[in-house]
Structure formats: structure tokens, C-alpha cells
Amino acid sequence: MPTLDELLRARLPTIGDWQPTPARRAAVLCPLVQRAGQDHVLLLVRPADARQHAGQVAFPGGMRDGDEPVEATARRETREELGIGDAAIDVLGGLGWRESSGGIQVQAVVARLQPVPLQPAAGEVVRVLHVPLAELCDAARWQQKPPPYGATGKQPTLSPHFAFGDELLWGLTARFVRDLLAALGG
């Protein structure tokens, strides 16, 4: 039976280049980590007073710098936000791109993170969450609901929502998680 990483390498497309668009571009890393023998998706919580995505649950990521390739953008942002160096990031494939509510083309890179100490950037990360992949795979835990009150940008009418403790995963990050689950076949 293949491991999760082998399965994702086989099912996810390789990381491509940026799509032709006049829109601004960003990349996020969808990090998978092992904790207590189980696979988890690593997410972070943005500060409540952040200029962008205040208080939201998100992947590490951000805007493209110059002519940086997709994977390089995701790696750089992960290094800046969590202190994780390139050697600890093993890229498994991509989830393609989606347009954010702010009209930004965002590409997601799926990677396995090696067990290294995290150094969250104080101005960008309030806390790090480790959500068990098995819980994310539980379809009964997901709901389609309108975006939370105060959501900015051009939001779709409904968004996938996943409650985890006191946190709520929704919006673009939730859509990328759903793309990952679809790649896993459930």
C-alpha cells in the first residue's frame, strides 16, 4: 500500500509556472506534518489586527516577489512566516490555482515538512494549528455557509467551513484543503 506522500506524488500535478493573467500573484504552502504517528495539515492563525486576512486561519504564503517561480514563492513565505528552511520542505505536487476574493491568482504547493522547530513570525502568525488529516476527511464536519460577517473582497455566496476547536477554516484556504481531499479520493 502506498504511503500518503507516494499517493500525492502520483495524483497531484507537478508545480507549473504562473498562469498568464494581469492579476497579482501569490503562492501558499499546504504543509503536511507527522504528529503522534498521524498526518496533520499545518495551518496558522493571522493576527486580529493584520492588514490582510485579519484573524483568519490560513496556509503560510504571500505575494510573488519579482519574477520568482511558484514554488520559490511558497518556500520563501514559509521561511519568513514559520522559520522553516528549504531543506525541511519536500514538495509533493500542486493543487493548481484559484482566484482570491481580492482578485489575486493564488497557487497552492503541497509539501511534507520534516520535524523541525517552528519560529512563527510575531507580526504575521498568532499561533500554529495542526489539524489531523483524518478529521479533515470527515465529510460530516464540513458545511457550506455564507462567509463570516465582516469578510472582505468579492466573496462567493457560499464557502466551505470547517470548525476546529475555537477556529474556523473557511474561504480560499478551505477550498484548497478540499482540493487536497479530492486528490486523496475523499
Image (spheres, rainbow, N blue to C red):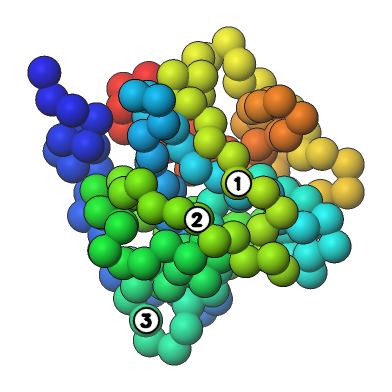
The mark nearer the N terminus, 3 or 1, is 3
Circle 2 crowding by C-alpha within 10 Å: few under 14, some 14–19, many from 20: few
In the image shown, does 52 or 123 lie closer to the viewer?
A: 123
User: Label 1, label 2: how many angstroms apart (C-alpha)?
Assistant: 9 Å
Q: Are marks 3 and 1 in contact (CB under 8 Å)?
A: no
Q: Amino acid at mark 1?
A: Val
Q: Which mark is residue 128?
A: 1
- The residue under label 3 is 68
Q: Which residue is mark 2?
A: 118
Q: Quadrant of residue 5?
A: top left
Q: Position of residue 148 (x, y in %)?
A: 82, 39
Q: Closer to the camera: disc 2 or disc 3?
A: 2
- Residue at screen point 53% across, 36% down: 130
Image location of residue 115, percent across then percent down: 35, 47
Q: Looking at the image, is 183 positioned above or below residue 95?
A: above
Side of 179 relative to 102 (left or right)? left
Asked whether the residues under the numbered discs 1 and 2 touch, taking CB atoms below 8 Å apart as contact, a structural biologist would say: yes
